[in-house]
Image (spheres, helix red, strand yellow):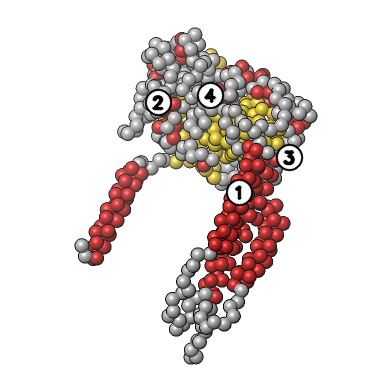
Amino acid sequence: MSVPARAAGLIIAFLVVVGLGVFVAVYYIGSQSQLTTVHYQASGGQVNVMLQEDPQNDSATKPDWVSYYVQDPATKQWEHTTLFSVPANTTVNVTIYGYDGCTPLRNNFFSQVQGTNGDTVSVTQFDQHGKQLGAPTTTSVINSWADCNVGHTFAIPNLGIYVPVASPNAQLSANNLCGSSPCTTQGNPYSQETFSFKSPARTGVYRWQCLVPCGGGYLDGNSGPMQTLGYMMGEMDVVS
Amino acid sequence: MSETTAEPAVVGGGRQPRHWLRMISIWFVLALVADLVTWFIWYPHMPPGDMSQSAHDQQFDIGVLAITGIPVVLAVLIYFIYSLIVFRARPGDDLDGPPLHGNNKLATGWIAITAILVMWCFGFGTYELVVPAGAGSGEGPSPIWQLAGKTSSTWTPGSGNMLQVQVIGQQWAWTFRYPQFGGMETSTLYLPVDTPITFHVTSLDVIHEFWAYEIGVKADANPGVDNVAYTTIHQTGIFQVRCNELCGIWHGAMFTYNHAVSPTAFQSWAQGVQQKEHADGLLTALPPYALTYDPTVLPELTDSNNLNKVDGITGANGYYYPGPQAGTNNGDPVSP
């Protein structure tokens, strides 16, 4: 084979390999939908962040993955995203609606509330008709191994924030667990958990995650929604 | 332009300069200067510092290997550069180089010097691995080289007892248990100075690596394995703990800032945490202290546990940790 023919063959082979790489990158990475970032504005030095965690989600590709949702403060719509921003050096009041049933923590240490104001959370449970079940409880530990009462966690490790998120009443959720996302407070038993923390003075992106191994169908419950933005892990962007 | 008339060094029969003597002289001066600069100026700043005994030992090892290696590197470079300058072909010199012959002295010297260097590295490395009790690295569940210190179920300042600390990795956070303080667990590592410390490193899920950089401790965190490492910290201050084994998407963010404090300050802190966790009920919620965790089994999930008696566990829409009513695997998370 002549030198030009061999050179042309090498160039073509090289271009084919590069083309395959580009195709894979575009197909698998570029085709993923861009996640929305929900922006929260401070009022009176405070900001109110609204989250919910669901047993499933409304995506087309992974509808059976557990997932967080973030409520847009302007439209009050629940966005299927885990990206939100808060102002720096501000009191962040978080409300999490827990619709998913209980799952025990692998490390029960994270049953302890850490890093919130007072190292406590306030928990209230509701039935599927929206009726409040008992008075709100302020607690520093929600023991995920003692009873069916922790669904997931909300943790920002770099800020030392670890919050177990209560699951709905076990008796009620047995046959009435929310089956369509985003879940609503009517027709589904749920828990409502509130806590506050101070956002850091230093701006930047702080990742948050669930520490319950809730990747159903994956080895040891890892991977899947546990490792995917928009599901059980996210980013809190602290802005000036 | 004048034409260069220089002759090749071997041609002409004139007296040859003593090339070996020249090269050795240049090498000796440069190596001496480089080693002195390395030892007295660079070495005190070499990583990982001297915050702990194991860090100090590692810094010493790196320093010694540096002053061992620098003369070798210089010998190669000097020979290379000297040859380029002195033995280069001059313009107009089309003669072949001198023929090569066997040189027993050179071969013997080469073998002897390299053998000495290799044996020195072997001997020094072995000694440094044994004497400072594993040099801060994980030694597995049955360490051969153990740090001197009494093993006890209690620890107080000045007791001479080893402080036991369990390091638990999970995606993507570190936690630390202190069996001598009721098995309390924290997300920040506090350690006392001037105290022999035993780390029991393990994992709840995938493979991580516990790397306490400034105190010179580095040990794999494998699920189901108790990996033991030792150190003694000599300086108070802040040190980092990082994961050094790619363990998932947030591996790079799996780090914490931790504290080395005086023994009395440590005791005060540890007792405070223990009391709070006792008061909160967390201590009773934690599993009994054990050297390993099996990621596939949560022994607390039994038929008699309240967790399953209602309806099986309902997390992840019922797919995960199925209870006894939902299947036969009785909470085995491997086969949800």
Q: Which residue is mark 4?
A: B293
Residues flagged by tags 1 and 3 on a common chain: yes
Q: Residue B9: where, in percent of width, then height?
A: 53, 78
Q: Locate residue B39: give its quadrant.
A: bottom right
Q: CA distance from mark 4 to mark 1?
A: 42 Å
Q: Where residue B227 sits: x, y (%)?
A: 57, 31
Residue labelled with disc 3: B234
Q: Can marks 2 and 3 be said to lie on one chain?
A: no
Q: Chain of mark 4?
A: B
**Chain to which the residue tagged by mark 2 belongs:** A
Q: Which mark is residue A204?
A: none
Mark 1 belongs to chain: B
- Label 2's element? loop
For mark 1, give the secondary structure. helix
Q: Amino acid at mark 4?
A: Tyr
Between B88 and A84, which is closer to the camera in this rendering? B88
Residue bearing mark 2: A216
In this rendering, position of residue B180 left or right of residue A218 = right
Is residue A235 something one can see in this rendering? Answer: no
- The x and y percentages for residue B169 are 55, 31
The amino acid beneath tag 3 is His
Residue found at the very far right of the displayed protein: B158
Query: At 41% across and 23% down in the image, what residue appears?
Result: B334
- The quadrant holding residue B213 is top right
**Residue beneath label 1, please?**
B119
Q: Measure how far apart labels 2 and 1 are at the Cα level.
A: 54 Å
Q: Secondary structure at mark 3?
A: loop
Disc 4 element:
loop
Tell me which label, 4 or 3, sits earlier in the chain: 3
Query: Mark 4, mark 1: which one is toward the viewer?
Result: 1
Mark toward the viewer: 1 or 3: 1
